[in-house]
Image: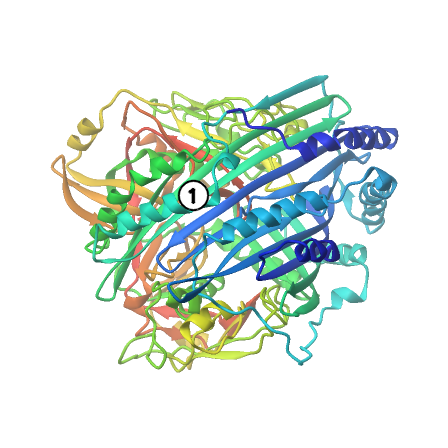
């Protein structure tokens, strides 16, 4: 297919550069209700995007217009040629500052390792299924339903400057719902979604077991009380969400677009930081991450970079285009985030009264304004005397008002593309309790 | 202008019928959905312009067969009459070999009846004022740049003003032993976003328009630019709300968000099959104030999710979910209806041909009442008018609701004070919220911006809306 496209491109005048990203995906998908298979699916697809670049000058200034199109394998040569001609015409009205494309480099990247390439997809999907239900053995709690996906993905990136790179990866996903019914209390459910690119015998059983156990807590949870001036501890997935704010603040594109005002050499947490300072590394080869890749979609070779050190922004991370605009070294787009743990242990963080929150309906942070909020599905209120599971109500706050005194646990958690603290302790967070 | 059918799909019909013929020798049920979605997304901002194919673009097929127990599916995007045998082998691999392997590994397989269909041949092509191919990329970019430049002149506090426009031309065919359906329609949407900054305080406000329209929608977008800039400026002075319960008036957009999150997701009947929907216990019972009537359906209103048939070949309908406060029924895909022994409602939707079909919302909205907005505001001593959807999340099992809202406009002694709070999170127990509805305005507005996920995936285009509603809600 790429040969066909390149041949058509060579016969159309006026194209200054081009880039093709081809992804071939083979998948197996199983859908369960309780332990029964409700449907099985599979797919074999090839998805291709082609970007056409057109250079032009106005008043002595160079511009590079572009237009990105999908090329479907079922398109005829005539259809592809027409799509390319339309894209070329459109690119002439895209007046972006000039930027170069990626050039080939003489460096062999590290290979992405995955045990999934050691056996057939059929055997792995069966093994993963057994992992889902191995801990589903409680009398009052069970897996309500589960959806399991395993994709084998071949990526190839080719451009007009001579880039021709490829790699293979896997994307596994398990979405599951757990139920618990405790005595006369209402039956409850919790949701979990995990992603993986390698086989880890403990990953799924441990995730299922943890969700079943905390579902039990939700079944007996009391309404979240109305609380003032009590520290909030975020644990699990919401911790990952918080750090997306710092990741986006250091994004070259957002700097160029003036959406982020973060400056290299300055503290992202402001002056006089009392709590832990943020240390962030972007690692393209983080183990068992579906975002690990040797190249980004420009075909740019990726390497580990330090973005924040002791709260100081050391460098922006950026794709080639925006790095060129900002006159900085490109890092490429790396989506794996590694955050150092803090000085205090979980035990230290949980001294005194606190509200610990682990499961929300949808915990979100606005990476432009720093506002964060979420409805509480499960947490634990320690009033100084006892720890009570709670549910309902919400929290809200702004990261800029809390990160001067924010404590990160020494213990770390790994969640797909995030390796960082298990918990964060914050102050000055609004709690909208129920009772 | 009538929206034309994809020539590609029309040309493949013969091959697909042949495929169904071959599959029917081995499988009691076989169907194929073919999709060809062609769209573009244009974006103009101060620092650059982009033109890309829409993320909704797709061209491919999904085959569904009855495997003797339940249903197996295979998605693919290469098709040739010469290689039909290979394709049939692949489908058999999923429906026979994979099922056999899973059974031998001790995995139980559920049992479904065979889908029974009546003979049906139908086609439907909607109309738009201006077809996408009638206007050039230059025309769109020029119009969008004019909107941006005009907006940038409204305020010195603007960091950027972003204009986005997207159009999608959707063509689908559905072929089974008894059905031969085809449809084609276009939806488009435009969004504008004003980003303002004063000192280190950055805020943004956005709005947009969407519908079963073509390029003509760009003219509607221009009219909203000034208000969007003014609202963004006001957000710079917004305060944080004191958490608590308040009398609120929800704008049609927020009423739509409530309808969607509260009783849209809550009555998706695949949730009934999984015992994930509390709604099952409440069919025939009061779940809302008597003022509440709520619909969903591809045929309920003309908007972005109005189609002739869904992604399982079921004709779209208009479902009355809540009638005078009483929960009547849910919305269903075909397989859930088979399991439940109910009638499918034409709500089986896929993110694309590559994904499974689920029971999904189409156009979901509350009916109008008799009240006037002015009277509703005047009736509140201390409360807020809520407007601007940020996001929402469902909880069908335990009936929690989370609505992230951009703006709460303060009401005191029956008047808007001009003070605003932002952002605001509205939470609560769904029946408490819906039963507290005490006034409903007399005009419905439908919003069709954005998309809906099931959990955190399976994105589909939907619309929702309603009139202004007065309720009591917990804000934080």
In the displayed image of the protein, which residue is found farthest to the left? B413
Where residue B106 sits in the image (x, y, percent)? 81, 49
Residue A158: where, in percent of width, then height? 66, 64
Asked whether residue A35 appears in the rendered view, the answer is no
Query: For the point 35% across and 63% down, which residue is it?
Result: A259
Residue pictured at 68% horizontal, 68% vertical: A164
Q: In this image, A155 relative to A286: left or right?
A: right
Q: Is residue A193 left or right of residue A248?
A: right
Residue B228 showing in the rendered view: yes
Protein image colouring:
rainbow
Displayed quadrant of residue B160: bottom left
Total numbered labels placed on residues in the image: 1
Count neighbours of disc 1 (C-alpha within 10 A) and say few if under 14, some if 14 to 19, many if 20 or more: some
Q: Which residue was labeled with disc 1?
A: B140
Q: Nearer the viewer, residue A227 or A322?
A: A322
Observer-nearest of A205 and A185: A205
Question: Is A333 on the left or on the right of A406, as rendered?
Answer: right
Give above or below for A411 relative to B277.
below
What residue is drawn where x is 36% and y is 78%? A264
Residue B50 image position (x, y, % from top left) = 46, 54
Parent chain of label 1? B
Q: Position of residue A186 (x, y in %)?
A: 49, 42
Question: Compared to B51, does B428 lie above or below?
Answer: above
Q: Secondary structure at mark 1?
A: helix
Query: Does residue A117 appear to the left or right of A379 in the view shown?
Result: right
- Asked whether A173 or B263 is in front, the reply is A173
């Amino acid at each position: 297919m790429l040969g066909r496209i390149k041949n058509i491109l060579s016969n159309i005048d006026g194209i200054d550069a081009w880039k093709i990203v081809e992804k071939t995906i083979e998948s197996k998908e199983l859908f369960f209700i309780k332990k029964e298979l409700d449907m099985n699916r599979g797919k074999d697809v090839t998805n291709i995007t082609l970007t056409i670049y057109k250079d032009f000058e106005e008043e002595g200034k160079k511009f590079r217009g572009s237009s990105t199109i999908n090329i479907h394998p079922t398109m005829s040569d005539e259809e592809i040629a027409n799509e390319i001609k339309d894209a070329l015409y459109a690119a002439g009205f895209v007046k972006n500052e000039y930027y170069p494309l990626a050039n080939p480099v003489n460096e062999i990247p590290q290979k992405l390792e995955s045990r999934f390439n050691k056996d057939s997809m059929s055997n792995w999907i069966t093994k993963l299924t057994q992992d889902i239900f191995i801990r589903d053995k409680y009398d009052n709690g069970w897996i309500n339903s589960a959806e399991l996906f395993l994709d084998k993905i071949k990526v190839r990136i080719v451009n007009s400057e001579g880039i021709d790179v490829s790699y293979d990866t896997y994307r596994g996903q398990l979405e599951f719902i757990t139920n618990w019914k405790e005595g006369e209390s209402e039956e409850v459910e919790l949701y979990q979604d995990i992603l993986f690119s390698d086989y880890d015998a403990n990953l799924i059983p441990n995730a299922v077991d943890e969700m079943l156990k905390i579902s039990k807590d939700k079944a007996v949870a009391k309404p979240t009380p109305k609380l003032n001036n009590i520290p909030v501890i975020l644990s699990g997935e919401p911790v990952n969400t918080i750090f997306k704010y710092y990741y986006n603040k250091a994004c070259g594109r957002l700097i160029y677009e003036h959406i982020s005002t973060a400056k290299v050499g300055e503290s992202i947490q402001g002056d006089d930081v009392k709590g832990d300072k943020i240390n962030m590394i972007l690692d393209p080869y983080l183990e068992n991450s579906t975002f690990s890749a040797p190249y980004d979609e420009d075909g740019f070779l990726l390497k580990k970079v330090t973005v924040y050190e002791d709260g100081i922004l050391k460098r922006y991370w950026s794709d080639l285009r925006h790095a060129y605009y900002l006159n900085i070294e490109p890092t490429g787009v790396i989506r794996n985030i590694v955050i150092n743990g803090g000085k205090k242990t979980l035990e230290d963080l949980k001294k005194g009264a606190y509200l610990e929150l682990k499961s929300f309906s949808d915990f979100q942070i606005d990476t432009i304004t720093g506002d964060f909020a979420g409805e509480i599905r499960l947490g634990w209120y320690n009033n100084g005397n006892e720890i009570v599971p709670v549910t309902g109500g919400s929290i809200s706050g702004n990261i800029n008002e809390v990160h001067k005194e924010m404590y990160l646990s020494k213990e770390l958690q790994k969640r797909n593309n995030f390796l960082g603290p298990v918990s964060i302790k914050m102050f000055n967070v609004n709690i909208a309790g129920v009772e | 202008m009538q929206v034309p059918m994809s020539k590609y799909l029309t040309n493949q019909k013969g091959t697909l019928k042949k495929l169904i013929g071959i599959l029917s020798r081995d499988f009691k049920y076989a169907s194929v959905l073919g999709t060809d979605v062609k769209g573009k997304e244009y974006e103009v901002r101060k620092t650059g312009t982009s033109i890309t194919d829409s993320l909704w673009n797709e061209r491919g097929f999904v085959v569904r067969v009855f495997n003797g127990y339940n249903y197996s599916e295979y998605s693919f995007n290469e098709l040739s009459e010469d290689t039909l045998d290979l394709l049939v082998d692949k489908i058999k691999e999923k429906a026979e070999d994979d099922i056999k392997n899973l059974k031998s590994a001790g995995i139980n397989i559920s049992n479904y009846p065979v889908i029974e269909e009546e003979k049906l041949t139908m086609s439907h092509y909607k109309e738009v004022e201006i077809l996408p191919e009638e206007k050039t990329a230059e025309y769109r970019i020029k119009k969008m740049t004019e909107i941006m430049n005009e907006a940038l002149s409204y305020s010195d506090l603007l960091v950027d003003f972003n204009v986005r426009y997207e159009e999608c031309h959707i063509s689908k065919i559905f072929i089974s032993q008894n059905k031969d359906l085809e449809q084609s329609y276009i939806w488009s949407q435009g969004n504008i976003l004003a980003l303002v900054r004063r000192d280190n305080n950055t805020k943004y406000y956005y709005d947009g328009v969407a519908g079963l329209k073509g390029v003509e929608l760009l003219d509607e977008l221009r009219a909203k630019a000034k208000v969007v800039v003014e609202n963004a400026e006001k957000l710079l002075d917004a305060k944080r709300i004191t958490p608590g319960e308040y009398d609120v008036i929800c704008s049609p957009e927020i009423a739509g968000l409530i309808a969607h999150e509260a009783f849209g997701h809550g009555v998706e009947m695949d949730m009934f099959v999984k015992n994930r929907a509390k709604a099952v216990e409440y069919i025939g019972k009061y779940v809302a104030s008597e003022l509440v009537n709520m619909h969903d359906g591809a045929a309920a209103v003309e908007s972005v999710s109005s189609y002739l048939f869904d992604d399982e070949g079921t004709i779209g309908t208009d479902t009355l979910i809540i009638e005078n406060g009483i929960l009547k029924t849910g919305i269903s895909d075909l397989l859930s209806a088979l399991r439940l022994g109910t009638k499918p409602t034409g709500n089986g939707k896929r993110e694309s041909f590559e994904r499974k079909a689920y029971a999904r919302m189409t156009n979901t909205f509350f009916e109008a009442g008799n009240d006037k907005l002015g009277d509703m505001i005047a009736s509140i001593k201390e409360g807020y008018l809520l407007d601007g959807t940020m996001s929402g999340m469902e909880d069908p099992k335990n009936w929690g609701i989370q609505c992230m809202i951009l703006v709460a406009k303060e009401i005191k002694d029956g008047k808007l004070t001009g003070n605003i709070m932002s952002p605001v999170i509205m939470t609560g127990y769904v029946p408490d919220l819906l039963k507290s509805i005490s006034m409903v305005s007399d005009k419905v507005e439908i919003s069709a911006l954005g998309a809906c996920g099931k959990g955190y995936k399976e994105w589909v285009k939907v619309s929702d809306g309603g009139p202004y509603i007065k309720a009591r809600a917990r804000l934080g």
